[in-house]
Amino acid sequence: MTERGDYEVVVGIEVHAELATESKVFCGCKTDFGARPNSQTCPVCLGMPGALPVLNRRALEYTIRAGLALNCSIARWTKFDRKNYFYPDLAKGYQISQYDIPIAHDGYIDIEVDGQPKRIRVRRVHLEEETAKLVHAGDDIISSNQSLLDFNRSGIGLIEIVSDADMRSADEARAYLTKLRSILVAIGVSDCKMEEGSMRCEANVSVMPKGSKEYGTLAELKNIASFRAVHRAIQYESAR
């Protein structure tokens, strides 16, 4: 029987950060947090037939700025792709995102845990649009009998930052997120306020025998609301 000490945890992290632009990524609607529901919308971010998107130049510049701050290479040519899925918060049935040619790629962040330096590779940084916000009526989602949609958030510029699976502990994951947040705030591309949803993260966790090159079964931890929660979730999943 293999002992727990013969395994090591493997962690990769995806971070979504809303861009601090004054207007949305493909239309001219404002992005003020806390505005009256559905007061910052237009045919583009409501997904009306025939409405055509126009790229916000500042959103592109912020994505490039983030890529450079994360030591990435910047694509000389890029494109957008449609991510098709059906969900109430996506009115037009697809999200404008990027797939095979992201704006920035192959970067890194240097962290330090317990005095030991480590380099975490950043696989890609790409630009996409935010979805609408679902608000469930009632005290909690279980007792709720209806859900409401606020499209003020729909179409806000969003960067997704994907790391390689280079982290080997919950402490390293927390150090990576802390460093990433400080960089994005310092360069002014996002306020990264997790309590307002402008920064969200997902952790991909697996375990494998020490010395192995094959990852174990992956557990995806979605929409985690704080760095402390990320740390605890990784510890729990790796033990499980």
Image: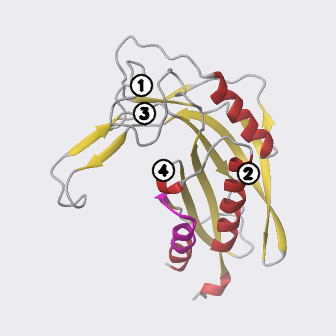
Question: Disc 1 versus disc 2: distance between alpha carbons?
Answer: 29 Å
Q: Whole-Å distance between the Cαs marked 4 and 2? A: 18 Å
Give the numbered dot on residue 183: 2
Question: Residue 239 location in percent, x, y?
Answer: 53, 80
Q: Badge 1 local density, few (<14 within 10 Å), some, or many (20+)?
A: many
Q: Residue at x 59, y 50 (%)?
A: 192
* Between discs 1 and 3, the one toward the N terminus: 1
Proximity of marks 1 and 3: CB atoms separated by less than 8 Å: yes
Would you name the residue on which mark 3 appears? 154
Name the spot of residue 6 as percent of width and height, x first: 67, 83
- Say if the magenta span includes residue 224: yes
Q: Please tell me whether mark 2 sits on a helix, a strand or a loop.
A: helix
Asked if residue 94 is positioned above or below residue 141 in the image, the reply reads above
Q: Amino acid at mark 2?
A: Ile
In terms of sequence position, does the residue under pointer 4 or pointer 3 come before the other? 3
Q: Answer yes or no: is residue 30 visible.
A: yes
93 above or below 178?
Answer: above
Circle 3 Cα neighbour tier, 10 Å, few/some/many (<14 / 14–19 / ≥20): many
Nearer-N-terminus badge (3/2): 3
Distance from Cα at disc 4 to Cα at disc 3: 13 Å
Instruction: Tell me if residue 103 can be seen.
Output: no
Q: Type of residue at label 4?
A: Gly
Element at badge 4? loop
Q: Is residue 239 a member of the stretch shown in magenta? A: no
List the residue tagged with mark 1: 45
Horizontally, residue 67 falls left or right of residue 153, namely right
Span of residues in magenta: 221-233
First-in-chain label (4 vs 2): 2
